[in-house]
Amino acid sequence: MQTNREPEPPLAFAVTTSARPSPRELASAHCLAGETGYRYVPRTHRSLSGMAADERLTGLIVVERGNFSLWVAGRCLRYHPNMAKLRLLALEQGKHDILVNALQLKLGDRVLDCTCGLGADAIVAACKVGATGRVRTLEASPLLALLVERGMA
């Protein structure tokens, strides 16, 4: 089925820092802006919501404390391994994991996760396939992919 819908406008993001950035945070923010192609916008004592409104942005990539977060519509998203920790603990205790069972994962296997999200399935799969295996992930959202890539590093 085809629709004649207009394409969504691109999301307007920019890179900024915490309210009182260290020289290292400033350098990281400028580097991240260069990597992503988003412009760097100095914080200049503004709130994140104030900045987004002033600059007409959909959201911000905020560099702070050696990491970064995505800020959209008053909500913040930081990388966290999510349920992967609990799933790995359960596996260590001899319990079953639906993904591991469904894929019959074992050492040396190769896995392609086409819906990475925050990477919980990829973490569990990587632990199960071990150093001789390989897990690759794909994520449709470049910003989410960047968040997970940096968070897992």
Image (cartoon, grey):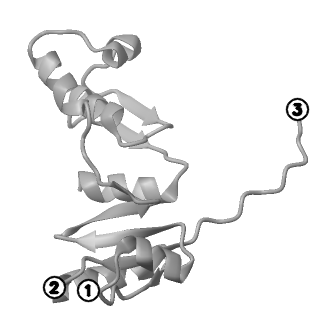
Tell me which amino acid carries mark 1: Leu
- Residue of label 1: 26
Q: Earlier in the sequence, mark 3 or mark 2?
A: 3
Is residue 35 visible to the viewer in this orientation of the structure?
no
- Quarter of the image with the N terminus is top right
- Residue of label 3: 1
Where is 70 relative to 99, above or below? Answer: below
- Residue of label 2: 22
State the residue at coordinates (54%, 73%). 57
Q: CA distance from mark 1 to mark 2?
A: 6 Å
Tell me which amino acid carries mark 3: Met
Q: Dot 3 lies on which element?
A: loop
Q: Quadrant of residue 29?
A: bottom left
Q: CA distance from mark 3 to mark 2?
A: 52 Å
Q: Dot 1 lies on which element?
A: helix
**Which residue is outermost to the left?**
93
